[in-house]
Amino acid sequence: MPELFIPPAKNTFPAYGIWLYKEKSPAIKRVKKESAPSAHGDRHWDSSYLLMDYFTHNPLKKKSRVLDVGCGWGPTSIYLANQGHKVTGLDIDDQVFGFLQLQADLNNVEVKTRQGAMDSLKKTDLTKFDVIVGGDICFWPELTDEWFSLLKRAANAGVKKLVLADPGRQPFLDLVDKCERWDNELLTWYCLEPKRFTGSLLLVELNS
Ligand SMILES: C[S@@+](CC[C@H](N)C(=O)[O-])C[C@H]1O[C@@H](n2cnc3c(N)ncnc32)[C@H](O)[C@@H]1O
């Protein structure tokens, strides 16, 4: 029989070894009174569960330094921090960080946060990371070019790889085409926690 895990708080659900608050929980409602995200950082997005599943089957090197671009409420950041990695969550919208902190506390993990667009990251900032991840953060057409330019700077800064998850929107597929200069792979992936979801993963080896 599988081990029975007791929820650490009411109105939470498990996913890949971490706990997240249900969106209608009183804890989330309290943060919503003080924070109003305005760039789609208003819930957990399913692509984050694809990343959790992918990294469960393809673990990163121990204590990797990870940048989660467009971290939102932090599901991917918290999962990777719980795996022992050193994670920074970047988001253009500082209104998401109250939700991220609430859930990092729930899981007793530390996630650094940084407010800013991905455009704001210079090569010197990027030298501090081994891996860049992102879940559902290539949804506007202009984000294709922002990502491509970030990846060029990241490659020059020595970042090893990118793992980007998406339902398969056009701006994401356009980014896939632009990444042909690096070793890259487009995978169809599915996850089963907290529910079944199928989407795409773009893997790019920036420095092997
Ligand atoms: C669809 S949400 C995904 C959130 C999270 N990755 C998840 O899977 O739950 C996109 C997030 O990206 C942020 N964002 C949008 N444009 C951005 C940019 N140019 N640079 C950094 N973050 C951005 C938004 O504020 C939002 O929190």
Image: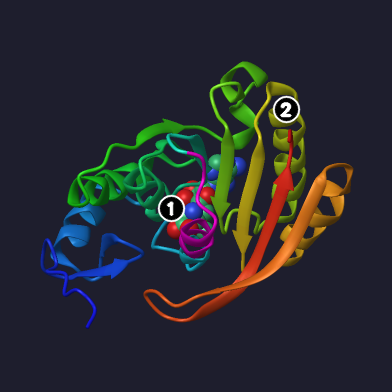
Residue 195: x and y in percent read 41, 80
Q: What's the residue type where badge 1 is placed?
A: Thr
Residue 56: x and y in percent read 46, 60
Q: Classify the position of the C terminus by image quarter.
A: top right
The residue at the point 60 percent across, 25 percent down is: 126
Tag count:
2
Q: What's the residue type where badge 2 is placed?
A: Arg
Say whether residue 40 is visible.
no
Front position in the image: 182 or 169: 182
Q: Is residue 67 above or below residue 103?
A: above
What residue would you read off at disc 2?
153
What residue would you read off at disc 1?
76
Ligand 1 neighbours mark 1 (CB distance < 8 Å): yes
State left or right for residue 39 relative to residue 34: right
The residue at the point 48 percent across, 65 percent down is: 53
State left or right for residue 4 relative to residue 195: left
The residue at the point 16 percent across, 70 percent down is: 5
Q: Of helix, strand and loop, which one carries label 1? A: helix
Say whether residue 88 is visible.
yes
Q: Residue furthest right?
A: 181
Q: Residue furthest front?
A: 1
Q: Is residue 159 above or below residue 143?
A: above
Q: Of helix, strand and loop, which one carries label 2? A: helix
Q: Residue furthest top?
A: 124
**What residue span does the magenta drawing correspond to?**
51-61
Determine the main secondary structure of the stretch shown in magenta: helix
Indicate yes or no whether the magenta region holds residue 56. yes
Question: Which label was assigned to residue 11?
Answer: none
Residue 174: x and y in percent read 81, 57
State left or right for residue 122 relative to residue 10: right
